[in-house]
Amino acid sequence: MPATLEFYMVHQVIRGKLRDDSGHRTIDVLNAATSQVVTLTDALSASLHVQAPPTRIQQVRVRRTQVMLIVPQSVEPLPPRQFRVGFVEKKPMAVGVGIGPFIVTGTIHISPTEPQPLAALEHDPSGRFFIPITKATMTSQYNPNWSLSADLIFMNRAAITCTYPLATA
């Protein structure tokens, strides 16, 4: 079943369907893609700067390096830990992340043995392009009245410009 995703780039947002029949999680599909291009179907493209009707595009190919953030429109719950192959216990950490014109706040999940937790955002030996942040809020630095809350956002590691820990209650 295709996953509906919103791709946020510097000047536009594209919403479309990512087709995958492998049964893997969406983030795993995005990270495992051998092509530098991700194809979305039944898409809409809109400007982040100008209020205008979106453009409908039957099929669009997007360079993965140009995508800063991905917001899945539906998030399927994961099975219990004992049923997940390769599950690794992680600890939550509240962070703020600068990505292009956006600030994203939320929770990342890191290895409890990570000596510098924020460094995990900067470098991943496994080479994952996209990393998840949960219970996230994305705000625009162009428009202080614009924000988006989502249970899950995927951040392009290469687009991260700054990171900082948030105080926890």
Image: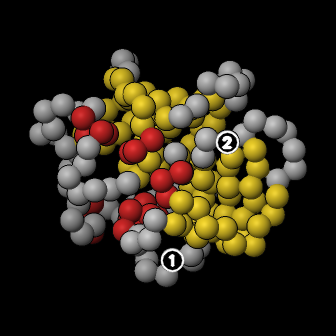
- The number of numbered badges drawn on the structure is 2
Which residue appears at 63% of the width and 37% of the height?
148
Provide residue 112's location: percent of width, then percent of height. Answer: 16, 39
Looking at the picture, tell me which residue is in the foreground, 87 or 159.
159
Which residue appears at 68% of the width and 55% of the height?
14
In which image quadrant can residue 6 be found? bottom right
Residue 14 sits above or below residue 161 on the image: below
In which image quadrant can residue 93 be found? top left
Which residue appears at 39% of the width and 72% of the height?
34
Looking at the picture, tell me which residue is in the foreground, 100 or 22.
100
Q: Residues within 10 Å of mark 2 (few under 14, many from 20)?
A: few
- Residue placed under numbered mark 2 in the picture: 11
Report the mark closest to the observer, 2 or 1: 2
> With 88 as the anchor, is 100 left or right in this view?
right
Q: Secondary structure at mark 1?
A: loop
Q: Amino acid at mark 2?
A: His
Residue 22 sits above or below residue 146 on the image: below
Provide residue 129's location: percent of width, then percent of height. Answer: 38, 54
Alpha-carbon span between mark 2 and mark 1: 27 Å
Which residue appears at 75% of the width and 35% of the height?
49
Provide residue 134's location: percent of width, then percent of height. Answer: 44, 42
- Residue placed under numbered mark 1 in the picture: 20
Looking at the picture, tell me which residue is in the foreground, 166 or 14.
14
Query: How are the colours assigned in the image?
Result: secondary structure
The answer to whether marks 2 and 1 mark residues whose Cβ atoms lie closer than 8 Å is: no
Q: Is residue 134 visible?
A: no
